[in-house]
Amino acid sequence: MSAELVAFFKALADSNRLKIVGLLAQQTYSVEQLAALLNLRPSTVSHHLARLSEVGLVSARADSYYNVYQLEEAALRKTNLLFSQEDLASMINDVDLDAYDRQVVGNFTNPDGTLKSLPAQRKKLEAVLHYVITAFKPGKHYNEEQVNKILVRYYDDTASLRRELVGFKLLQRDSRGGEYWRAAEVDNLGDIE
Protein backbone atom coordinates (compact mmCIF):
# COMPACT_ATOMS: atom_id res chain seq x y z
CA MET A 1 0.00 0.00 0.00
CA SER A 2 2.85 2.44 0.73
CA ALA A 3 4.15 2.15 -2.85
CA GLU A 4 0.65 2.99 -4.10
CA LEU A 5 0.48 6.04 -1.84
CA VAL A 6 3.90 7.25 -3.02
CA ALA A 7 2.81 6.88 -6.65
CA PHE A 8 -0.45 8.66 -5.85
CA PHE A 9 1.30 11.61 -4.22
CA LYS A 10 3.89 11.80 -6.99
CA ALA A 11 1.06 12.00 -9.51
CA LEU A 12 -0.40 14.95 -7.60
CA ALA A 13 2.98 16.63 -7.02
CA ASP A 14 2.58 19.01 -9.95
CA SER A 15 0.50 22.19 -10.05
CA ASN A 16 -0.80 21.49 -13.56
CA ARG A 17 -1.93 18.00 -12.57
CA LEU A 18 -3.71 19.46 -9.54
CA LYS A 19 -5.45 21.93 -11.87
CA ILE A 20 -6.46 19.06 -14.16
CA VAL A 21 -7.94 17.20 -11.18
CA GLY A 22 -9.77 20.38 -10.17
CA LEU A 23 -11.16 20.89 -13.66
CA LEU A 24 -12.22 17.25 -14.01
CA ALA A 25 -13.98 17.49 -10.65
CA GLN A 26 -16.32 19.98 -12.35
CA GLN A 27 -16.92 18.21 -15.68
CA THR A 28 -15.31 16.05 -18.37
CA TYR A 29 -12.80 17.58 -20.78
CA SER A 30 -10.84 16.56 -23.85
CA VAL A 31 -7.05 16.98 -24.10
CA GLU A 32 -7.56 19.90 -26.48
CA GLN A 33 -9.91 21.68 -24.06
CA LEU A 34 -7.58 21.15 -21.09
CA ALA A 35 -4.62 22.40 -23.15
CA ALA A 36 -6.47 25.62 -24.01
CA LEU A 37 -7.67 26.14 -20.44
CA LEU A 38 -4.20 25.61 -18.94
CA ASN A 39 -2.26 27.26 -21.79
CA LEU A 40 -0.23 24.08 -22.33
CA ARG A 41 0.60 21.98 -25.37
CA PRO A 42 -1.74 19.02 -25.91
CA SER A 43 1.24 16.67 -25.65
CA THR A 44 2.05 18.06 -22.19
CA VAL A 45 -1.56 17.61 -21.08
CA SER A 46 -1.51 14.04 -22.43
CA HIS A 47 1.61 13.36 -20.36
CA HIS A 48 -0.07 14.71 -17.21
CA LEU A 49 -3.23 12.70 -17.90
CA ALA A 50 -1.15 9.55 -18.36
CA ARG A 51 0.45 10.09 -14.94
CA LEU A 52 -2.96 10.63 -13.33
CA SER A 53 -4.38 7.64 -15.16
CA GLU A 54 -1.55 5.37 -13.93
CA VAL A 55 -2.74 5.86 -10.35
CA GLY A 56 -6.40 5.56 -11.31
CA LEU A 57 -7.34 9.20 -10.73
CA VAL A 58 -8.64 9.77 -14.26
CA SER A 59 -10.13 7.65 -16.99
CA ALA A 60 -11.00 8.28 -20.62
CA ARG A 61 -13.96 7.42 -22.80
CA ALA A 62 -14.55 8.02 -26.49
CA ASP A 63 -16.90 10.88 -27.39
CA SER A 64 -17.13 11.60 -31.13
CA TYR A 65 -13.68 12.58 -32.33
CA TYR A 66 -12.20 12.89 -28.87
CA ASN A 67 -11.33 10.99 -25.78
CA VAL A 68 -12.86 12.83 -22.86
CA TYR A 69 -11.37 12.47 -19.41
CA GLN A 70 -13.17 12.25 -16.11
CA LEU A 71 -12.11 12.20 -12.50
CA GLU A 72 -12.34 8.84 -10.76
CA GLU A 73 -13.45 9.89 -7.30
CA ALA A 74 -13.25 6.30 -6.09
CA ALA A 75 -9.46 6.54 -6.34
CA LEU A 76 -9.51 9.49 -3.96
CA ARG A 77 -11.70 7.59 -1.50
CA LYS A 78 -9.62 4.43 -1.79
CA THR A 79 -6.57 6.22 -0.45
CA ASN A 80 -8.59 7.63 2.44
CA LEU A 81 -7.91 11.12 1.14
CA LEU A 82 -11.03 13.15 0.78
CA PHE A 83 -10.97 16.42 -1.08
CA SER A 84 -14.04 18.55 -0.63
CA GLN A 85 -15.63 20.21 -3.66
CA GLU A 86 -14.24 23.49 -2.30
CA ASP A 87 -10.71 22.03 -2.19
CA LEU A 88 -10.99 20.83 -5.77
CA ALA A 89 -12.54 24.11 -6.93
CA SER A 90 -9.74 26.12 -5.30
CA MET A 91 -7.21 24.29 -7.48
CA ILE A 92 -8.56 26.06 -10.56
CA ASN A 93 -8.96 29.61 -9.25
CA ASP A 94 -6.48 31.01 -11.78
CA VAL A 95 -7.73 28.99 -14.80
CA ASP A 96 -9.47 30.93 -17.58
CA LEU A 97 -12.49 28.70 -18.18
CA ASP A 98 -13.40 30.47 -21.44
CA ALA A 99 -9.97 30.04 -23.07
CA TYR A 100 -10.96 26.99 -25.14
CA ASP A 101 -14.10 28.63 -26.50
CA ARG A 102 -12.19 31.81 -27.41
CA GLN A 103 -9.53 29.75 -29.17
CA VAL A 104 -12.15 27.85 -31.20
CA VAL A 105 -14.07 31.02 -32.07
CA GLY A 106 -10.81 32.66 -33.13
CA ASN A 107 -10.06 29.73 -35.44
CA PHE A 108 -13.52 29.79 -37.05
CA THR A 109 -14.08 33.54 -37.47
CA ASN A 110 -12.82 36.14 -39.88
CA PRO A 111 -11.43 39.46 -38.60
CA ASP A 112 -14.89 41.04 -39.09
CA GLY A 113 -16.52 38.44 -36.77
CA THR A 114 -18.22 36.41 -39.52
CA LEU A 115 -17.87 32.65 -39.49
CA LYS A 116 -15.54 30.96 -41.97
CA SER A 117 -17.56 27.75 -41.60
CA LEU A 118 -19.51 25.75 -39.04
CA PRO A 119 -17.29 23.25 -37.23
CA ALA A 120 -18.07 19.58 -37.81
CA GLN A 121 -16.92 18.57 -34.33
CA ARG A 122 -19.61 18.92 -31.68
CA LYS A 123 -17.56 20.64 -28.96
CA LYS A 124 -16.18 23.20 -31.41
CA LEU A 125 -19.63 23.79 -32.88
CA GLU A 126 -20.99 24.40 -29.40
CA ALA A 127 -18.31 27.03 -28.74
CA VAL A 128 -19.16 28.81 -32.00
CA LEU A 129 -22.88 28.69 -31.24
CA HIS A 130 -22.28 30.22 -27.80
CA TYR A 131 -20.48 33.04 -29.62
CA VAL A 132 -23.44 33.61 -31.97
CA ILE A 133 -26.20 33.38 -29.35
CA THR A 134 -24.86 36.47 -27.55
CA ALA A 135 -26.33 38.54 -30.42
CA PHE A 136 -29.81 37.73 -29.09
CA LYS A 137 -31.09 39.76 -26.14
CA PRO A 138 -32.31 37.79 -23.12
CA GLY A 139 -36.09 37.90 -22.78
CA LYS A 140 -36.70 39.36 -26.25
CA HIS A 141 -38.79 37.44 -28.80
CA TYR A 142 -37.94 37.47 -32.51
CA ASN A 143 -39.81 36.40 -35.62
CA GLU A 144 -37.97 34.25 -38.18
CA GLU A 145 -37.14 37.23 -40.38
CA GLN A 146 -35.53 39.03 -37.44
CA VAL A 147 -33.58 35.89 -36.48
CA ASN A 148 -32.28 35.53 -40.05
CA LYS A 149 -31.30 39.20 -40.14
CA ILE A 150 -29.14 38.66 -37.05
CA LEU A 151 -27.70 35.33 -38.21
CA VAL A 152 -26.70 36.57 -41.68
CA ARG A 153 -24.24 38.90 -39.94
CA TYR A 154 -22.41 35.73 -38.88
CA TYR A 155 -23.03 33.20 -41.62
CA ASP A 156 -24.81 33.12 -45.01
CA ASP A 157 -26.54 29.78 -44.39
CA THR A 158 -28.94 31.12 -41.78
CA ALA A 159 -31.14 28.02 -41.91
CA SER A 160 -28.27 25.74 -40.84
CA LEU A 161 -27.12 28.14 -38.17
CA ARG A 162 -30.67 28.60 -36.81
CA ARG A 163 -31.23 24.81 -36.81
CA GLU A 164 -28.00 24.24 -34.85
CA LEU A 165 -28.88 26.94 -32.30
CA VAL A 166 -32.28 25.33 -31.76
CA GLY A 167 -30.77 21.82 -31.71
CA PHE A 168 -28.28 22.82 -29.00
CA LYS A 169 -31.18 24.42 -27.07
CA LEU A 170 -29.54 27.84 -27.13
CA LEU A 171 -32.39 29.32 -29.14
CA GLN A 172 -35.94 28.23 -28.48
CA ARG A 173 -38.98 28.53 -30.69
CA ASP A 174 -42.71 28.20 -30.26
CA SER A 175 -44.49 25.10 -31.51
CA ARG A 176 -45.50 26.82 -34.74
CA GLY A 177 -41.89 27.85 -35.40
CA GLY A 178 -42.79 31.50 -35.93
CA GLU A 179 -41.30 33.00 -32.78
CA TYR A 180 -37.81 32.54 -31.33
CA TRP A 181 -36.05 33.60 -28.12
CA ARG A 182 -32.76 33.05 -26.39
CA ALA A 183 -32.96 30.13 -23.95
CA ALA A 184 -33.01 31.16 -20.30
CA GLU A 185 -30.16 28.74 -19.51
CA VAL A 186 -27.75 30.80 -21.63
CA ASP A 187 -28.70 34.22 -20.26
CA ASN A 188 -25.68 34.15 -17.94
CA LEU A 189 -23.19 33.44 -20.71
CA GLY A 190 -20.30 35.82 -21.00
CA ASP A 191 -19.45 37.25 -24.39
CA ILE A 192 -16.73 35.34 -26.21
CA GLU A 193 -14.52 37.80 -28.03
Image (cartoon, helix red, strand yellow):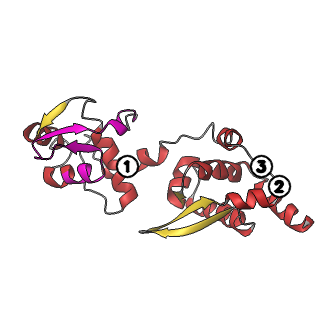
State yes or no: residue 192 in magenta: no
State yes or no: residue 164 in magenta: yes
Question: Residue 55: in sight, yes or no?
Answer: yes
- The reply to whether dot 1 and dot 2 touch (C-beta < 8 Å) is no
Which residue is at a point 75% across and 52% down the rendered structure image? Answer: 14
Measured in 3D between alpha carbons, the distance from the residue under mark 1 to the one under mark 3, in whole angstroms, is 33 Å
When asked about the image quadrant of residue 76, the answer is bottom right
When asked about the image quadrant of residue 193, the answer is top left
Report the disc number at residue 80.
Answer: 2
The amino acid at mark 2 is Asn
Q: Which residues are magenta?
A: 163-189
Q: Nearer the viewer, residue 181 or 135?
A: 181
Kind of element beneath mark 2: loop
Q: Nearer the viewer, residue 104 or 12?
A: 12
Q: Quick one: label 1 or label 2, which is nearer the N terminus? A: 2
The amino acid at mark 3 is Leu
Kind of element beneath mark 1: helix
Residue density around tag 3, few if under 14, some if 14–19, many if 20 or more, within 10 Å: few
- The reply to whether dot 1 and dot 3 touch (C-beta < 8 Å) is no
The amino acid at mark 1 is Ala
Report the disc number at residue 4.
Answer: none
Which residue is at a point 41% across and 68% down the rendered structure image? Answer: 64
Kind of element beneath mark 3: loop
* Residue position marked by numbered label 1 in the rendering: 127
- The reply to whether dot 3 and dot 2 touch (C-beta < 8 Å) is yes
Report the disc number at residue 82.
Answer: 3
Left or right position of 8 against 150 = right
Which residue is at a point 54% across and 56% down the rendered structure image? Answer: 28
